[in-house]
Image (spheres, coloured by chain):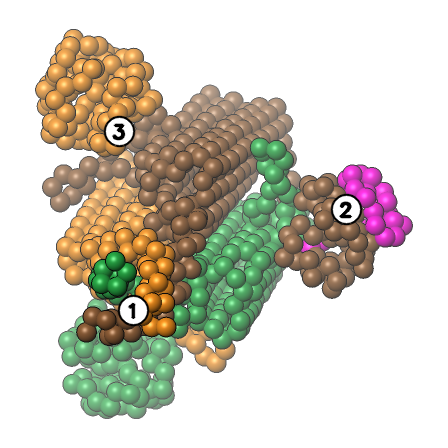
Chain colours: A orange, B green, C brown
Amino acid sequence: MKKSLNEIAVLIGGEVVGDGDTQINSVNGIREAQEGDITFLANPLYKPLMNTTKASAIITSKEIHSARKPIIRTDNPSLALTKVIAIFSIKEESAILPGIDKAAVIGKGVKIGKNAAIAAFVVIEDGSMIGENSVIYPHVYIGSNTKIGSNTKIYPSVTIRENTIIGSSVTIHANSVIGSDGFGYVQAGESYQKIPQTGIVVIEDDVEIGSNVSIDKARFGKTLIGKGTKIDNLVQIAHNVRIGSNTIIVSQAGISGSSRLGKNVTIAGQAGIVGHVELGDNVIVAAQSGVTKSVSENTIVLGSPASSISEQKRIFAALHKLPGLLKVVKALKDKILK
Amino acid sequence: MKKSLNEIAVLIGGEVVGDGDTQINSVNGIREAQEGDITFLANPLYKPLMNTTKASAIITSKEIHSARKPIIRTDNPSLALTKVIAIFSIKEESAILPGIDKAAVIGKGVKIGKNAAIAAFVVIEDGSMIGENSVIYPHVYIGSNTKIGSNTKIYPSVTIRENTIIGSSVTIHANSVIGSDGFGYVQAGESYQKIPQTGIVVIEDDVEIGSNVSIDKARFGKTLIGKGTKIDNLVQIAHNVRIGSNTIIVSQAGISGSSRLGKNVTIAGQAGIVGHVELGDNVIVAAQSGVTKSVSENTIVLGSPASSISEQKRIFAALHKLPGLLKVVKALKDKILK
Amino acid sequence: MKKSLNEIAVLIGGEVVGDGDTQINSVNGIREAQEGDITFLANPLYKPLMNTTKASAIITSKEIHSARKPIIRTDNPSLALTKVIAIFSIKEESAILPGIDKAAVIGKGVKIGKNAAIAAFVVIEDGSMIGENSVIYPHVYIGSNTKIGSNTKIYPSVTIRENTIIGSSVTIHANSVIGSDGFGYVQAGESYQKIPQTGIVVIEDDVEIGSNVSIDKARFGKTLIGKGTKIDNLVQIAHNVRIGSNTIIVSQAGISGSSRLGKNVTIAGQAGIVGHVELGDNVIVAAQSGVTKSVSENTIVLGSPASSISEQKRIFAALHKLPGLLKVVKALKDKILK
């Protein structure tokens, strides 16, 4: 399929600068693009690549006024990109056909909604429900009395333990584990006795969960992932954690037991949050930070132990002056105190 | 089922303060509890919640003498809670029935103990043994010549490689990998040649291992997880590591090759231990620490690189004074050295 | 099987010091070895163990000239060890027989090479290809239109998503996920809209990937793992990352989206690399470091945020003097400024 730049500009709502008759037949990254591709510049870091890309045209923000190549200026290049990808309808994933594969094992009293697809080697235990149009890939295990909404996708080898509640339009990527026992023991002399973990996990609508993620069930009550929250790969969510809506948790971050996150929070990669603290709405935790106490809303914290960004920036700057400082103080000491 | 507070107090061994006739029909967390529930206070952080919980009664430690609500004072509220949960016999997980599912694949010479349950889509390779009453959930892979004791539970999609030895009353949560090859290569020019990893993993009795954990087999000899040790989710245990009994390793921590941990050690979340070091009995490594050398018994270390808690606390405190210090030294320098 | 030390020395290319008639029947670690075993000393840390090992002989480097026990001096003890292991041909893993197990599900148009082994409960979707002699263990999922070369091993419960390209002599350990969606969203008001992830993952020849690893497909274009690169367990490789040849990435490290690593790079355990940076050839990133900007070739960086090893060593040393410094400055201030 080919489209002219003018046609694309109309479809994505942008303004062409340059030759609007340029013919486009695909979309690609700014480095990978070849002639005939349209690409995009969302991250200003990549601006110098506008001069070297082989793409035939570039989608940019309004900050860019012109370029050597034809451009489409838009208010939101990332959103425009999403629309362009849809236009060229790039071939997507393996189709799991609606219906129950004959090599799936379905327990007693299980209800499967209209057009739901249950692939080979799936196990669904007694009393569980799968909503309409949901897709359950091969090797998924769904424990008893679990409820999964409609239009939800569960990728291969995900394990979902009993009594879990998962909303609609949720995506869980491969090999993640939802509802394993929380990590709770009572010390009895030298050894540890397990505390029964009898709660559940609740995942609200529009949540996306990456691969190899662990979300533990509550000791009792529930571990909650709020509507629209997005969780990257290899993240740990401990028992009884509650996460608000539209929160972002980047890869390899960990949230310890019973901590609570507000909405629109961002936890960057490899950060850790101790147990039993609260992070208010819109809090941002920088990568590799270690949060040891509650953080009030609209605050950015970093460092391990984490404190406010302004304090940490002063500390980081001072640290680099520290070796020099030692010399100055020694000189002063030699002159004054000796 | 309903029980009076007096009845519960007898069963868990505690003393009622307040109305002993209060009727209880369930147990729940202090925030989640409703009328009719009993809850508990183990963490002093939550003390203010005693005044706001909707629970009808609270299990407390002996430090609490009375409250607005009826309480049961006990020596060990967490242990008492475990007993209360047992009393109200909260419904547990999917029952995998004893016997070998017809959709399991069992190799030659495999021995399955009495009352063991082997679920659908399990693969057990030649020469392996599963002890009495053990439960192997769907999608588990057990390599050849592996021995698993009695009363052990292996959750879905766990992979256990050949020659592994697992004791009795062990629990391994979903999607963990036991006995993968250790990470060992010899540099030969620019490229790397794999060192054969021909050892095994030995997991002693009463060990619990979380979800998405990786425990590598030894280069030769064994990687050892001692009796009663508890490992949280997403933990890395490299080849030839030896861990003593009753040790706690919290989520996302990593132990590098050939390091040895004593008994009753605690490794907090996201901490890392380099290879070839020893940590003595009762060592505590704080969250996100990086341990770069051996640590003698009964020591608490933190920081990256880690050192003793007393030194690190002084450093952390001094760090926050550092920006101010720079100004003072500049003033001194201006006055004296210029 | 028994061999004399003289025979072994000829086979591995080394020089015997001591009794060359010593009979050896197995190989083991320096701590684990018993009488009749040969062991080796590669890491100088273990030198004192040469006097306490129960092994009958030791393979050493040329730096060792003699010992109480008979030794074989070699140029490269680790390489010699690999040869010795081959000599004693220690029994290896479960044999998956060539052919397609009757409990595997194979899609339309799938091509399986000669002598390839496809185990029980494997799912291969339409249009995929598996090369000669490759082994696909139980519970592996291979999405549509994926190509896997020859002599490649995919361990149990690995998920490989559609359109992935995997070379020859590649090993992927259990429960890893290749080709899941990258973590990319556009903020639209309070909520996030998913950016389609339509690229692929390409894994070149001779790559080894540990267990529980997550490698995301590209937003578009490809995520690339270069020839001969070795990746440890629980590592995160985000969308559009490109990694050169013969690079080492140790357990629990994470590489964020669109970053590029050269060849012969080493990323130590639990280190993190932000997105959109480049690391030149032979760069070494120390354990737990956080790399926030590009690093030029042949550089060692550490710390979080990371800087050069020389600067960080000065900072670490100065940090330990900081509490003392505060006292000195206070004394100076009291004398001069008050």
Gap in Å between the C-alphas at discs 3 and 1?
Answer: 47 Å
Percent x, y of residue A196: 38, 69
Inspect this view and state whether residue B37 appears. Answer: no
Instruction: Report the magenta residues as a range.
Output: C1-29
The answer to whether residue C81 is above or below residue A83 is: below
* Residue C257 higher or lower than C306, as above or below: above
Write the residue at 12% across / 16% down: A17
Q: CA distance from mark 2 to mark 3?
A: 54 Å
Residue at 32% over, 65% down: A332
* Disc 3 versus disc 1: nearer the observer: 1
Q: Badge 2 is on which residue? A: C73
- Tell me where residue C305 appears, x and y as whole percent: 34, 49
Secondary element at tag 3: helix
Q: Which residue is mark 3?
A: A46
Q: Is residue A126 left or right of residue B125?
A: left
Tag 1 secondary structure:
helix
